[in-house]
Image: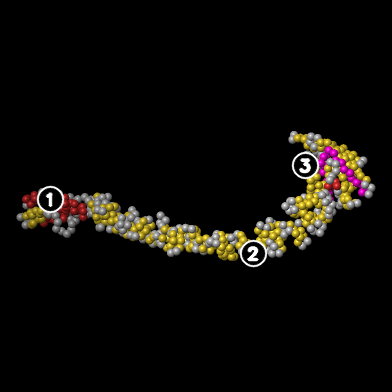
């Protein structure tokens, strides 16, 4: 309570005592402040001048009562009362904000200020403090406790070790990530189960040793080495070679792998048999054996069945008896494992190949040289000798007697007659065979400038037609052909065409035979009946045939020829 001085005035005339409070200037200011702080509406002078419980009475009301009660007041007393300053009602002002929080802001003396109010610390701006003060971390004016602030963990306002929302923080309040803490490895605050950044494997924060996802780990890393008799590489049981030993699934291998036989991881030495592709196979020094052992032929470790190097095997041994087998897509005959040469079931075979019977009544049109399979001359077959001939041998035409005895090989099909510097060698057929369904003769001119031969019109009378052919050559071919056959004469002239690319012969003429019949024998000699014609073609490719003569030509025309040329024999068909 503030100190007050009281003035006591005695009124002698009225016998009354009036009590009037006197306030000093300092005390008046204090009262004014109190009134403002307490937000009261009555003035201090009102409270001082009345003892009534009603604080709403004014000083004027007190004075009136005194005037009514006392009719006679001494001059001195009146002077004393009237000498006090007039009392007025004070103006109402806003209450002072002091040590209070308004709208979340702390005030002292009507201004935002730092301080503590109801356990909350406020900053100089009057707002709840965030930050460090006196080495303690505050959040919204409260000491941070068991919570994260800027990613750091605080307990009692200080950085601390602990677990927050299931994640581990160290003594500095930092999240434990990709490192060890208290003997455990953490990733993002949790004991790691899985691979760390450096590739090590952990389980519940401990370096893992054991099998995981089909791989073996030791101290968190994929294991390479040997453990309890098992070899590993990069965590997998080793299949492969290490230190000269072959492993399979981590164990030294015994058995066949990649066509190699192993025993305790090393290649077997010597001869050994083992199961390979569901059969028993022979190995030599660990490798599948190819060769002959104890009379049995092996290929890639297996007793061989089939043809190899023109030998036929069954279960590693030469196949006994006659058997057919395919060699290079051709069916061949074998006898006791070797290609057969000879007669089998009335057919002729050579090196297993069945030969084609051409004729059982053939004869050479001239004396023919015979050779053996090596090409060495072994004799001469006289012209006209009846023989059997076969085609299909790689050594030539196989010749046998009519009884089937092998005589040798003749030149395949044709033999040389003469040579012409302009046309090269001319040939005639080596053999004639009457079984051919079609026979053909064709003129071969050694010197086409002058060819002469006779055609026998009648074998009995030996009447002949003499044929002469003369040709003249020009720049682009044969310019003219003159033919005389008995009474017939032909003079043929070639025609030519030209363009920007050159000149060429547009027409042509040739001596040919047609409708040649099978040869016949007359008085021990062989003759061919044929038609000799002159065939031409014009610039429009039209063919014109002119018959010169019909008659017989002797076999000698095929063997020794005639003046300027010979006839060739072209056989068609066969038996």
User: Outermost residue toward the right?
Assistant: 461
Label 3 element class: strand
Distance between mark 2 and mark 3 Cα atoms: 56 Å
Q: Which residue is mark 2?
A: 315
In the image, is residue 448 part of the stretch drawn in magenta?
yes
Q: Which mark is residue 492?
A: none
Magenta part of the chain = 438-459
The label nearer to you, 1 versus 2, is: 2
Which of the marked residues, 3 or 1, is nearer the chain's N terminus?
A: 1
Q: Is residue 41 visible?
A: no
Numbered mark located on residue 24 in the image: 1
Label 2 secondary element: loop
Residue at left offset 71%, top offset 61%: 334
Residue sitting at the far left: 12
Question: Residue 340's quadrant in the figure?
Answer: bottom right
Q: Is residue 388 visible?
A: yes
- Within-10-Å neighbours for mark 3: few <14, some 14–19, many 20+: few
Question: Residue 395, position in %: x, y?
Answer: 74, 52
Viewer-side residue, 321 vs 205: 321
Residue 288 against residue 422 in the figure, above or below: below
Q: Position of residue 477 (x, y in %)?
A: 80, 37
Give the distance between the C-alpha atoms of the residues marked 3 and 1, in whole angstroms: 165 Å
Assess whether mark 2 and mark 1 are in contact (beta carbons under 8 angstroms).
Answer: no
Compared to 486, does 100 lie above or below? Answer: below
- The answer to whether the residue labelled 3 contacts the one labelled 1, judged by CB atoms less than 8 Å apart, is no
Q: Position of residue 2 (x, y in %)?
A: 14, 55
């Amino acid at each position: 309570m503030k100190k007050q001085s009281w003035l006591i005035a005695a009124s002698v005339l009225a016998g009354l005592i009036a009590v009037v409070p006197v306030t000093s200037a300092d005390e008046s200011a204090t009262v004014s402040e109190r009134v403002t702080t307490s937000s009261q509406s009555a003035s201090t002078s009102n409270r001082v001048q009345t003892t009534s419980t009603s604080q709403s009475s004014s000083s004027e009301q007190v004075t009136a009562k005194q005037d009514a009660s006392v009719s006679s007041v001494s001059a001195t007393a009146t002077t004393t009362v009237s000498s006090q300053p007039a009392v007025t009602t004070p103006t109402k002002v806003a209450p002072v904000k002091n040590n209070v929080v308004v709208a979340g802001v702390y005030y002292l003396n009507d201004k935002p200020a730092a301080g503590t109010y109801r356990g909350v610390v406020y900053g100089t701006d009057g707002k709840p403090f965030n930050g460090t003060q006196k080495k303690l971390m505050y959040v919204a004016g409260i000491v941070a406790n068991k919570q994260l602030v800027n990613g750091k963990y605080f307990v009692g306002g200080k950085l601390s070790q602990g677990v927050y929302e299931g994640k581990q923080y160290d003594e500095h309040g930092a999240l434990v990530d990709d490192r060890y803490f208290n003997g455990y490895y953490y990733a993002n605050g949790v004991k790691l189960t899985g691979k760390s950044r450096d590739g090590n494997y952990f389980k519940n924060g401990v370096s893992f040793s054991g099998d995981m996802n089909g791989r073996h780990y030791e101290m968190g890393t994929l294991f390479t080495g040997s453990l309890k008799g098992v070899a590993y590489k990069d965590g997998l049981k080793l299949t492969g070679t290490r230190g000269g030993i072959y492993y399979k699934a981590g164990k030294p291998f015994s058995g066949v792998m990649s066509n190699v036989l192993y025993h305790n991881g090393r290649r077997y030495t010597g001869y050994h048999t083992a199961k390979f592709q569901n059969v028993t196979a022979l190995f030599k020094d660990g490798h599948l054996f190819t060769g002959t052992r104890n009379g049995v032929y092996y290929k890639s470790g297996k007793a061989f069945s089939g043809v190899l190097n023109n030998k036929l095997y069954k279960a590693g041994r030469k196949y006994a008896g006659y058997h057919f087998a395919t060699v290079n897509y051709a069916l061949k005959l074998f006898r006791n494992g070797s290609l057969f040469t000879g007669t089998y079931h009335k057919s002729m075979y050579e090196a297993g190949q069945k030969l084609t019977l051409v004729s059982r009544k053939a004869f050479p049109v001239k004396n023919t040289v015979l050779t053996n399979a090596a090409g060495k001359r072994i004799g001469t077959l006289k012209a006209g000798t009846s023989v059997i001939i076969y085609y299909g041998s790689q050594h030539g035409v196989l010749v046998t007697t009519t009884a089937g005895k092998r005589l040798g090989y003749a030149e395949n099909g044709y033999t040389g007659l003469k040579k012409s510097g302009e046309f090269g060698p001319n040939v005639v057929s080596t053999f004639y065979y009457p079984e051919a369904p079609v026979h053909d003769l064709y003129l071969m001119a050694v010197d086409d400038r002058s060819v002469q031969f006779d055609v026998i019109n009648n074998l009995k009378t030996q009447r002949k037609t003499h044929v002469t052919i003369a040709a003249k050559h020009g720049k682009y071919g044969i310019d003219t052909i003159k033919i005389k056959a008995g009474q017939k004469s032909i003079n043929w002239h070639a025609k030519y065409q030209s363009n920007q690319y050159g000149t060429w012969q547009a027409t042509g003429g040739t001596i040919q035979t047609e409708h040649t019949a099978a040869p016949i024998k007359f008085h021990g000699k062989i003759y061919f009946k044929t038609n000799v014609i002159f065939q031409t073609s014009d610039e429009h490719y039209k063919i014109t045939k002119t018959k010169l003569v019909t008659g017989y030509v002797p076999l000698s025309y095929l063997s020794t020829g005639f003046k300027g040329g010979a006839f060739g024999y072209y056989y068609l068909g066969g038996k």
